[in-house]
Image (cartoon, helix red, strand yellow):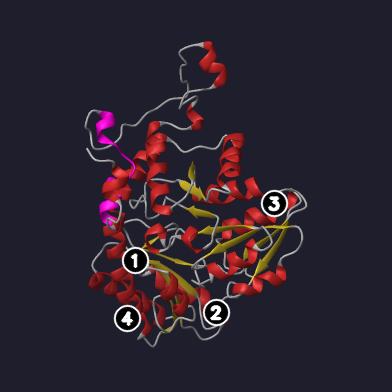
Amino acid sequence: MKNKETYLTGAGDNTRLAHLGHDPMSYHGFVNPPVVHGSTVLFPDCKTMESRDQKYTYGTRGTPTTDALCDALNALEGSAGTVLVPSGLAAISVPFLAYLSSGDHALIVDSVYAPCRHFCDTMLTRMGVEIEYYDPAIGSGIESLIRPNTRLVHTEAPGSNTMEMQDIRAIADAAHRHDCVVTIDNTWATPLYFRALDFGADVTIHATTKYPSGHSDIVMGSVSANEKHWPRLHEATITLGICGAPDDAYQILRGLRTMGVRLAHHQKSALAIAQWLEARDDVARVLHPALESFPGHALWKRDFKGSSGVFSFVLKADGPEHFRAKSHAFLDALSIFGLGYSWGGYESLAVKVNLGDRTIAKAPSEGPVIRLQIGLEDVVDLQKDLEAGFAAAAAV
């Protein structure tokens, strides 16, 4: 068989997804890598054991199964190395712990994933790290916030729930002039629609729980770093004893094979629903980067290859006193859309988002924000379900 790197060079996304991260001839021709369970790894002799001069030494340091997934993610990201962690939140907290120390200053985008903010405001603050939140639209202006002790700039594009776009290249260029590490939560776009390291990010973070899994049954995260920042990330992961389980890695690998096909369907359906919502009188705003009406659309169009299935809209309400009742009536009337956290699975979900922790990118004033995950169902059925929600909200 030809060298895989050779025959996949220049191949399309779906071809690469079907073949990355496995080598059938290494496993008797089976197309999927085996699930290797293990904690103890034996050495042939004392000399090898003392030098650890063999590929696998202990279960927390990787198995052929977890390595297969890391190899696939490295190929997709263009990264020097990838670590697997037990959740998307761990994929944020582990690199923060790797690159930040007491006395350091970190800049965190204000539209960040809420549990990330909680981690920053509690654990990192207790460790003596100073946290400052910044406007997602700041771009190159972030340089004015960088201090002599600034060590990390965390980005997220688009932002959680309200979908603000960021100019990652401009932010990274400014941060690198001061030797800051730039991290990005790139879960929404996946490396298929945005290769963050190509735009200057040093470390790209994913909740592989979402689109790489695709079936709402695995919780896992991944962190991929460029060559400069990989050694410190790898060392921190070993020191913390954080690792991904081989069974979960196998499931994520299986999900990767269809991720491109699923993302195309999520994208098409979500955009159709977003455009349909935009035309409704009972919707104040639709927060979707691929809509021309969205403030960050030009950035999305310039840098991204596509959009996924998650976006939000503002349900029109007459005054804040009606926000809760309107949103509850809308959500409780839904049947196909489930009321649940997470996203990226095959099923559609809806949730009222809480933006009360924002300090700069404040919540819209026209009404409550409803986040939708558009799954793999037929658009016409989803529209009927949303119609029931709007009817219930109108009755309040």
Callout 4: helix, strand or loop? helix
- Circle on res. 67: none
Residue 285 image-quadrant placement: bottom left
Which residue position holds label 4?
Answer: 276
Q: Distance between the residues labelled 2 and 4?
A: 20 Å
Q: Which segment is the magenta one? A: 14-27
Residue 388 in sight from this viewpoint: no
Residue 263, given in percent of the width and then of the height, sits at 32, 61
Query: How many numbered marks does the figure carry?
Result: 4
In the rendered image, the vertical position of residue 3 relative to residue 388, given as above or below: above
Residue 64, given in percent of the width and then of the height, sits at 38, 32
Amino acid type, label 1: Ile
- Circle on res. 374: 1
Q: How far apart are marks 4 and 1 (CA)?
A: 13 Å
Amino acid type, label 2: Pro
Residue 227, given in percent of the width and then of the height, sits at 53, 48
Residue 79 in sight from this viewpoint: yes
Residue 157, given in percent of the width and then of the height, sits at 50, 66
In the rendered image, the vertical position of residue 20 relative to residue 172, given as above or below: above
